[in-house]
Image (cartoon, rainbow, N blue to C red):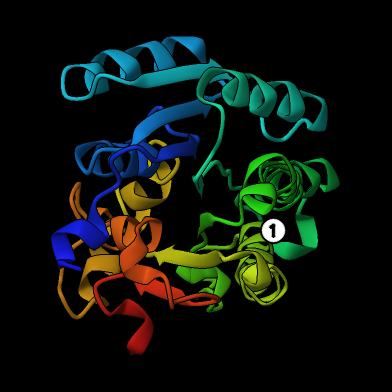
């Protein structure tokens, strides 16, 4: 089979959580370009509408619906609605996430729980339901979790203190490995992408404080860009990665190697 055929997503249904902007929208653009039928969830209807208009200029099939993945009660209706619309979910991009900055000794419990509810529990519940309703019965699935190099490394406290975020992304890293081992029997692959610093609404404040330092400490001497997740996300979502599972790949310009 040709490489083009292996990477082709025509006829596949891809759900991107947190897909209305930032890294999620970048990935949605890539999957749509390769032929996938898109489903996007996010909290804010206005941002979803903008994303649908943007993607609709390039792709015919873009289905959006509001969903707060930090609230368990919101997840089931959203996944069921996508299943009603498309009939299945072949690809799940778990991108929705949040962060909080505070010294560990002063980190508010409420903020800790907010991060965990979305980054860990919401990801688990979304994946569990997609698996039960679509991927396991059909014996096919591609799951891509958006982790972070923060889940692989500690932080220089002079630059950033984000214990809850780091902890949550570390959980995503090992959830990826554990689920890959458990669901491989169903022909479901589970991999993770661990981005470094990318400009986004979530990173706007921290990059305003440490952007120059982050660039100086990165071998490729730049931040992540608008095209930098597309190739890897498409690989993990496609049949070109059929024998790759349980892997975590950093996309950080080399920052994690020094």
Vertical arrangement, residue 109 with respect to residue 104, above or below: above
Give the secondary structure at mark 1: helix
Q: Quadrant of residue 169?
A: bottom right
* Residue 158 vs residue 37, the one in the foreground: 37
Residue at image x 23%, y 19%?
Answer: 54
* Residue 126 vs residue 142, the one in the foreground: 142
Q: Is residue 224 visible?
A: no
Relative to 97, 112 lies left or right: right
* Residue 177 vs residue 243, the one in the foreground: 243
Quadrant of the drawing holding the C terminus: bottom left
Q: Residues within 10 Å of mark 1 (few under 14, many from 20)?
A: many
Q: Quadrant of residue 34?
A: top left
Q: Position of residue 69 (x, y in %)?
A: 67, 34
- Location of mark 1 (residue): 164
Q: Is residue 250 visible?
A: yes
| Mark count | 1
Vertical arrangement, residue 181 with respect to residue 201, above or below: below
């Amino acid at each position: 089979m040709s490489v083009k055929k292996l990477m082709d997503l025509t006829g596949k249904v891809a759900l991107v959580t947190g897909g209305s902007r930032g890294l999620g929208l970048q990935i949605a653009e890539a999957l749509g370009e390769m032929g996938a039928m898109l489903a996007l969830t996010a909290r804010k209807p206005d941002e979803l509408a903008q994303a649908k208009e943007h993607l609709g200029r390039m792709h015919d099939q873009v289905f959006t619906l509001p969903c707060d993945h930090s609230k368990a009660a919101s997840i089931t209706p959203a996944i069921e609605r996508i299943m009603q619309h498309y009939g299945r979910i072949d690809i799940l991009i778990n991108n929705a996430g949040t962060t909080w900055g505070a010294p560990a000794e002063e980190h508010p419990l409420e903020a800790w729980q907010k991060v965990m509810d979305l980054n860990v529990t919401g990801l688990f519940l979304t994946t569990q339901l997609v698996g039960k309703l679509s991927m396991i019965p059909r014996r096919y699935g591609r799951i891509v979790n958006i982790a972070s190099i923060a889940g692989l490394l500690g932080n220089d406290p002079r630059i950033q203190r984000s214990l809850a975020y780091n902890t949550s992304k570390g959980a995503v890293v090992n959830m990826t490995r554990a689920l890959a081992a458990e669901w491989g029997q169903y022909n479901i692959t589970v991999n993770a992408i661990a981005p470094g610093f990318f400009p986004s609404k979530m990173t706007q404040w921290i990059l305003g404080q440490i952007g120059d330092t982050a660039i100086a400490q990165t071998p490729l001497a730049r931040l992540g860009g608008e095209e930098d997740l597309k190739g890897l996300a498409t690989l993990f979502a496609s049949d070109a990665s059929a024998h790759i599972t349980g892997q975590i790949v950093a996309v950080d310009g080399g920052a994690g190697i020094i």
